[in-house]
Image (cartoon, rainbow, N blue to C red):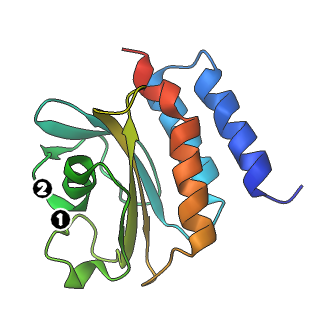
Amino acid sequence: MPITAKSTLNDIRGIAASGNDRPEKARRLAELIQKLGEYRWVGVYDVGVELVSIIGWIGLGAPQFPAFSVEQGLTGAAIKEKKTVIAGDVRSDPRYLTAFDNTQSEIIVPVLAPGGGRVIGTVDVESERTNAFSVRDQQMIEQCAEAALPLWLLR
């Protein structure tokens, strides 16, 4: 069966509602998002008071549980601005926090607590290609982040 936006969203909702632990849910979520396009790595970030930590990832060379200040990088910008950040060519963006040598573009979707207001996590998708994210990809990844909201409500 081909991967479609609707089936992937349904799968993500199922993962978010399952009884697995958060890192396992995050890894399964990352695997599904990666099937949507030519993405080499997906991170699901947990936003603390001052640090952002990866709780799930997929792809070669991804570090296990790094943490960095919410003031740093494109992820920090998405958290502070409370909106999706898309960098078509990350190397020309001064907000880019170098993590992998072959990253060319990124999309970072902040996940808001119910009722809006506070960012409690982000979904960060990277690609080796510049301008990798079409409008379809942007919308789907934003929907995936919303569907996966329960990942951040298990505290």
Outermost residue on the right side: it is: 1
Image spot of residue 146 (x, y percent): 53, 40
Kindly identify which numbered label has been placed on residue 110: none
Dot 2, crowdedness within 10 Å: few (<14), some or many (≥20)?
A: some
Quarter of the image for the C terminus: give it: top left
> What's the residue at 34%, 37% (across, down)?
121
Kindly identify which numbered label has been placed on residue 97: 1
Q: Secondary structure at mark 2?
A: loop
Amino acid type, residue under disc 2 in the picture: Gln
Image spot of residue 150 (x, y percent): 51, 25
Query: Mark 1 and mark 2 in contact (Cβ < 8 Å)?
Result: yes
* Quadrant housing residue 50: top left
Dot 1, crowdedness within 10 Å: few (<14), some or many (≥20)?
A: some
Image spot of residue 127 (x, y percent): 45, 72
> What's the residue at 63%, 49% (across, down)?
32
Counting the numbered discs, the total is 2
CA distance separating discs 2 and 1:
7 Å
